Amino acid sequence: MISQQTSVAAMLILGGLIIGAVFIIRPKVLLRKRMNQIGMIGDGGASDKAESRRQKRIQEKVKQLEQKSRKQSRLEALRSQIMQAGLDINLGTYFVFSAIIGVFASLGYLLTGLPPLGAVPVLLIGAFLVPKLLLGSMADRRQRKFTRNFADAVDLIVRGIRSGLPINECFRVVAREFDPPLGEEFRLLVEGQNLGWTIDDLMARGIQRLPTAEYKFFAIVTQIQRQTGGNLAETLSNLSNVLRERKKMRDKAQAMASEAKASAMIIGSLPFAVAGILSVVNPAYLMLLFTEKTGNYLLGFGAFWMTLGSLVMRKMINFKM
């Protein structure tokens, strides 16, 4: 009896699969095949092919940019960071300033009366970590300032192209109408073209100075459009819409992370607030941390773990898109 029920169930399942293959899957396969045949003959297929080729070229350009950034040596990467920060100094000047910061940091540490053994890590932190953090902060501030009005600059270029202006003249208008670093970057593009540089080389140098995703999109789209042809105004208009959507998403993410930032600021400031209150209420209780060697070690460990926790929280609540 059980075997008969099993065979009946198996026949029903097999019949269902056959019916599904005949009445559901096969018509979809035939429809997809017919649509592909029509696309190969009609204009839609040609446009889809052109669009896919353009997307492949854009992906190849992005991969090339990523490979170039990875192949940089440490000195080249440091030189790029100085350029991104907008500083007009060479590596020698940077190393001199780094050494000065490290020496002054170690001297300040020794003047506080803390154990001399801690002057060595303070020297290393002041000479290597602090300058890199300053460069990173300056570069991030400069890139945010560039990105803030970049979509408006692209819209201005689109309106100029649609009105009949050449793209070099549109770049000159952007350089005149916008403040640095946005206007300065387009001014360098105009001056470089006047000196005989190609637009590809100029934009490659611009990406080294401002390695933002928005500027990479603009450079790659412009280069691909010049190679393949087509409506540059329409392409840049679509790019402007993408940039505005990215900015909207970034602002939304920052708004959602504002609560976490406030919590991180409160948690980070609590030890200093409690120490300040204790220094007023009971100074002798708190001064043990500064007068005793064990207290000095506890202060050092506390500063290390607080710094590490602050960096972790900063990494968690900062979104780069």
Image: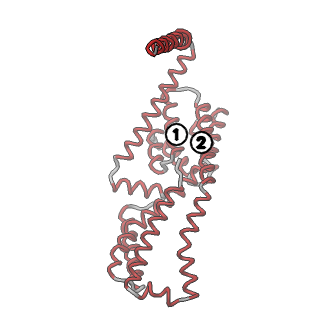
Residue 255 drawn above or below residue 156:
below
- Along the line of sight, the residue nearer the viewer: 52 or 78: 52
- Residue that lies at the very extreme toward the bottom in this rendered image: 284
Tell me, for residue 217, which label it has, or none. Answer: 1
Label 1: few (<14), some (14–19) or many (≥20) C-alpha neighbours in 10 Å: some
Residue 211 drawn above or below residue 62:
below
Q: Position of residue 123 (x, y in %)?
A: 36, 74
Dot 2 or dot 1, earlier in sequence: 1
Secondary structure under the numbered disc 1 in the rendered image: helix
Q: Position of residue 304 (x, y in %)?
A: 42, 70
- Residue that lies at the very extreme toward the front in this rendered image: 1
Residue 168 drawn above or below residue 20:
below
Tell me, for residue 243, which label it has, or none. Answer: 2
Q: Can residue 173 be seen at all in this image of the molecule?
A: no
Secondary structure under the numbered disc 2 in the rendered image: helix
Residue 154 drawn above or below residue 42:
below
Q: Quadrant of residue 142?
A: bottom right
- Along the line of sight, the residue nearer the viewer: 264 or 209: 264
Q: Position of residue 268 (x, y in %)?
A: 53, 69
What amino acid type is highlighted by mark number 1? Phe
- Cβ–Cβ under 8 Å for marks 2 and 1: yes
Judge from the rendering whether residue 218 lies leftward or rightward of residue 156; answer left or right.
left
Judge from the rendering whether residue 117 lies leftward or rightward of residue 130; answer left or right.
left
Q: Position of residue 120 (x, y in %)?
A: 33, 75
- Residue in view at x 50 percent, y 21 percent: 49
